[in-house]
Amino acid sequence: MRQTINKALRYAFAHTLPILAGFGFLGMSYGIYMSAAGFPAWLPLLISVMVFGGSLQFVMVTMLPGAFAPLSAFLMAFMIQARHVVYGLSMLEKYKGMGVKKPYLIFGMCDETFSINSSVTLPDGVDRGWFYLFVTLLDQLYWVAGTVVGSILGEVIPFNTQGIDFVMTAMFAVIFLEQWLKEKHHAASVIGVVSSVGCLLLFGAESFVIPTLLCMLVLLAAFRRPIEKAGEEQ
Amino acid sequence: MTLTEQLLTVGVCVAATLITRFAPFFVFSSKRKTPAFVGYLGKVLPPALFGMLLVYCLKEVDILGGSHGLPEAIALAVVVGLHLWKRQMLLSIAGGTVCYMLLVQLVF
């Protein structure tokens, strides 16, 4: 038993090593950002354990100081995290029969964990369940550790943090650009940008989120045929 | 927001997250086929959403007043330039952020 666990842990660690750098850096930036926004160190820690989703967590930093708007927060969070539904659907078969490990495997799902667990081919002798569990756990540990280090750094080092909030803009810009370079056609990306700019101009910065989300869904549904066709052709 | 309202907001975000993670395992089974529309949204929603999140980050930028969005534009150009050049995510993010911090602290 112990040997099985050790082997799976070592194998999982090797697979998640590239994620250590990314999650360490982004988690740290998040911690510093939260501390610069004036939040106590326990709050980012709590959020990183419970939410464990970078995009949403960064957006939450801008939500929390604003007006109390639970419905808007829920819709925004649901849409940002909606891709987990697709990850879950792809893992239905693989996570079957995982017993007590299963709730945490589902709870700790993220982009990086999904990309490893959905595609890995394990050699004989490495236990699948323990491997999935350790990948999920290690990825979250890197993120939480980065958050804690960042929150502490933010409080201890008295450097001028003005402008640190741009880390979120830069992160989404890179994700968007990376996507743009990879995708076959830009219909969905363009719909996202056009809907948000349009709604921003119409409704203003305070209340454009919900109209934008609706507008995007309507446009994506309306243009489903041509978009799916464009995806197949090239 | 008061602290209670902030914690409630965190709770709402946690709830939304839990739903997206657990729903597939309760609603669908591996035998039943996933509705095609869900599969379609899974493909097109992320690109649309990241476009929106980028606009969301820039929503407070005032092109007509203040620094006219210049620091943002310059720093974004640095992010894009670095990324097209090296294609290293962390380098592009760190480079753009440091550039922006220097701009708003020292120049604008």
Image: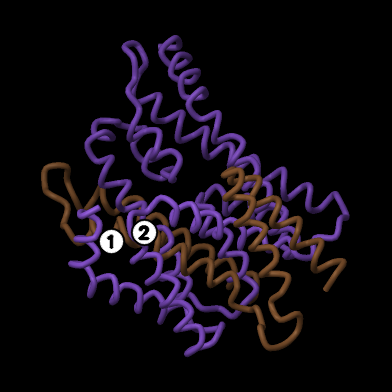
Residue under label 1, please give it: B41
**Residue B30 left/right relative to A102:** left
Q: Residues within 10 Å of mark 2 (few under 14, many from 20)?
A: many
CB under 8 Å between discs 1 and 2: yes
Quarter occupied by residue A229: bottom left
Quarter occupied by residue A92: top left
Name the residue type under label 1.
Leu
- Which circle, 1 or 2, is nearer the viewer? 1
* Mark 2 belongs to chain: A
Residue at screen point 23% across, 50% down: B26
- Residue A122 or residue B89, whichever sits in front: B89
Residue A217 sits above or below residue A123 on the image:
below
- Residue A186 or residue B6, whichever sits in front: A186
Picture coordinates of residue A27, whole percent (x, y): 63, 47
Residue under label 2, please give it: A82
**Residue A170 left/right relative to A98:** right
Picture coordinates of residue A88, whole percent (x, y): 30, 46
Residue at screen point 80% across, 66% down: B103
Residue B106 sits above or below residue B89 on the image:
below
Q: Residues within 10 Å of mark 1 (few under 14, many from 20)?
A: some
- Residue A33 or residue A166, whichever sits in front: A166
Q: Colour of chain A?
A: purple
* Mark 1 belongs to chain: B
Name the residue type under label 2.
Ala
Q: Colour of chain B?
A: brown
- In which quadrant is the N terminus of chain A drawn? top left
